[in-house]
Amino acid sequence: MTTTLPREIEDTYVRVINLARPDEEEGQRQAGALRAEGMFALGRKDTAGARRVMAQLETLRQTLAQEYTIRIVTSNPAGVERIPDENEQARNYYVIVQAIGPGGKPLPQDITSEEDGKTKRVDTWGVRVSADEYRAVRNDKRDNGIIENNVVGAKKRGYLEPQYDYARVQRGFITEW
């Protein structure tokens, strides 16, 4: 505990900091806070706490290393309409998306639904869009069964969160439909 674990925490912290892009301040902040928490645990001789922090640092590193493209699915449905419980006069529109990794396979993501506030790990989720964007995607799929303009965002290496094309999508997600 006195040499191996402190070195592992420090080495993982350095890998996280080196991986995080300079403008990824939240990732750098989290890494620093976890490093401090790990060293504090070591100072209290709390091996279990230090190992928990080490695991959190490694998860942070993996998140920063991840890359994917957020694409609208071509299966049915490619989109859904919802009427919110709070306002039955309103209508929310969603396109159904997946995070597609470099190998072409969907990558599960932790998504918080705006409908119930619950976070779930899912392969497929809905991203809220305007009515015009919803109709454009629907019409794009209807013309030949393919959605040509299917990319709505991407997660780049070195960042914690994906960046969405906010000219196309609005903030808000669902995990069930």
Image (spheres, rainbow, N blue to C red):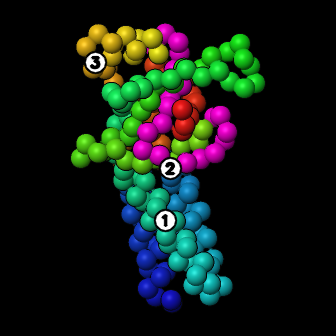
Left or right: 39 in relation to 164: right
Residue 7, percent across and down? 44, 79
Q: Residue at x 65, y 34 (%)?
A: 115
Question: Which residue is identified by label 2?
Answer: 121
Displayed quadrant of residue 91: top right
Amino acid type, mark 1? Leu
Q: Vertical placement of 41 versus 138: above or below?
A: below
Give the mark nearest the N terminus, 3 or 1: 1
Give the mark nearest the N terminus, 2 or 3: 2
- For the view shown, which residue lies furthest in the right direction? 86
In whole angstroms, how far apart are the C-alphas of marks 2 and 1? 20 Å
Q: Residues within 10 Å of mark 1 (few under 14, many from 20)?
A: many
In whole angstroms, how far apart are the C-alphas of marks 3 and 1? 43 Å
Between marks 2 and 3 in the image, the one whose residue lies nearer the viewer? 3
Q: Secondary structure at mark 1?
A: helix
Q: Which mark is residue 156?
A: none
Q: Residue at x 58, y 30 (%)?
A: 172
In whole angstroms, how far apart are the C-alphas of marks 2 and 3? 28 Å
Residue 125, percent across and down? 48, 36
Q: Nearer the viewer, residue 165 or 42?
A: 165
Asked if the magenta segment contains residue 38, the reply would be no
Question: Which residue is identified by label 3?
Answer: 145
Please say if the residues under marks 3 and 1 sit with CB atoms less than 8 Å apart. Answer: no
Amino acid type, mark 3? Gly
Question: Which residue is identified by label 1?
Answer: 57
Q: Residue at x 60, y 78 (%)?
A: 49
Between marks 2 and 1 in the image, the one whose residue lies nearer the viewer? 2
Give the mark nearest the N terminus, 2 or 1: 1
What is the magenta range? 114-133
Residue 1, percent across and down? 50, 89
Residue 133, percent across and down? 46, 14
